Each structure stands twice: as structure tokens, then as C-alpha cells.
Amino acid sequence: MAELMSMIDYEIALATSVDIAGILELQEQNLSRRGGMLSVALSQEWFEKTLNEMAVIVARNEGRVVGFLVSSSFAAFANVPVVEAMLHVYPGGDGAYIYGPICVAYSERGRGLAARMFAALWMQLPDREGILFIRRDNAASLKAHLKMGMQEVGEFTHHDIVHAVLAYKS
């Protein structure tokens, strides 16, 4: 199996408008209402605007989006209650931004794509603080993000679900 995984050549790149359909499809498959861990459904219009403002990283396999990682301004999530709850606990420093959502296709998990997308984002936003939240019951994501060097800076509960707040500075 290790040989098969090493033969897969993922492309990690900045997303373009062409990637939005694949991002939306992957997002839909991983929303909490479908049993996934993504808390917020973002629209095509939201992604179009965000692509022009900040870095959105995608992982592609044979042209198909198999992962994405969003960075965005605080304003992009204005009036989103779960994000407001996070920022109430930890508002971040000057120039901070929202990290996430991040999503990797179920079939591609365990292959280091989250870390590779994070490294690409890190290079796009040097010397800036990223802030994110992860549901406490998402042990795999918590473990992966702590392994990438992020630190837990707080905790909050939203709709009876406990979330950890993490932050990092590139």
C-alpha cells in the first residue's frame, strides 16, 4: 500500500475560479448535516470573493479537487455565530486571519495532504497569525493540527458542541 501512495502525485496550488465547483462538492460531502465535521456551508459567491482577497489552497489529483484549505479575513465570516464564538475566546493579534475550513476527501486522508496544504498557505501569508477552531470530537484533525505546530489557545461551546481554538504564526 505504501508503494501505491507514493505513486500518487498531488498538485498543491492556489485555487482558481475553475476549482470552486470541486471545492463546493467536497464541502457538501463533509458538512455536519451529512455526518462530516464541517460546520459552515460556504456559497459559490463566498468562494469567488475570497479567492480575490486571500489564499485558498487546493490539492488536486488528476485535475480533481481532493482537498482545500481556506484563509480569510475576519470580515468574511462576519455574523457567522460559530466564528464569532471563536473570536470572542481568542481575537488574535494584528493582521490575524481565519484558517479554515480545511477538508480532505475521505479517500485521500492519511497521505499528508493537510500538512502539504498548510505548508503552501504558510508561504503565502508570512509573518501572520492564523486562528481556527476544531470540534473536540474530531480527534484526527486536532492531532494533525497540533503535529503541524499549532497551539491550543482556548475553548468554546456552540450548539452544545465543544470546540478547541488553535493558533499559529508563520
Image (cartoon, grey):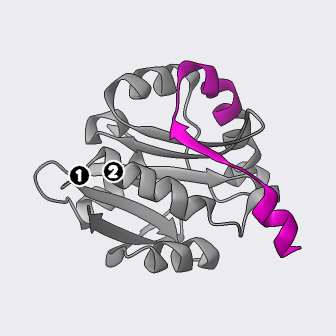
Residue 126 numbered tag: 1
What kind of element bears circle 1? loop
Label 2: which residue?
123
Nearest the eye: 103 or 123: 123
- Residue depicted at 70% across the width and 66% down the height: 111
Q: Is residue 116 above or below residue 21?
A: below
- Tell me the kind of residue under disc 2: Met
Image quadrant holding the C terminus, namely bottom left
Query: On the picture, is 74 further left or further right than 34?
Result: left
- Tell me the kind of residue under disc 1: Pro
Disc 2 crowd, CA 10 A, few/some/many (<14, 14-19, 20+): few
What kind of element bears circle 2? helix
Q: Are marks 1 and 2 in contact (CB under 8 Å)?
A: yes
Q: Is residue 26 above or below residue 119?
A: above
Query: On the picture, is 42 further left or further right than 87?
Result: right
Query: On the picture, is 18 further left or further right than 152?
Result: right
Residue 95 visible in the shown view: yes
- Residue depicted at 46% across the width and 38% down the height: 56
Q: Residue 75: where, in percent of width, then height?
A: 27, 35
Residue 22 drawn in magenta:
yes
Q: Is residue 81 above or below residue 108?
A: above
Magenta stretch: give its range: 1-24
Image quadrant holding the N terminus, namely bottom right
Q: Residue 148: where, in percent of width, then height?
A: 44, 73
- Residue depicted at 78% across the width and 37% down the height: 62
Residue 35 visible in the shown view: no
Residue 116 drawn in magenta:
no
- Quarter occupied by residue 63: top right
Q: CA distance from mark 1 to mark 2?
A: 6 Å
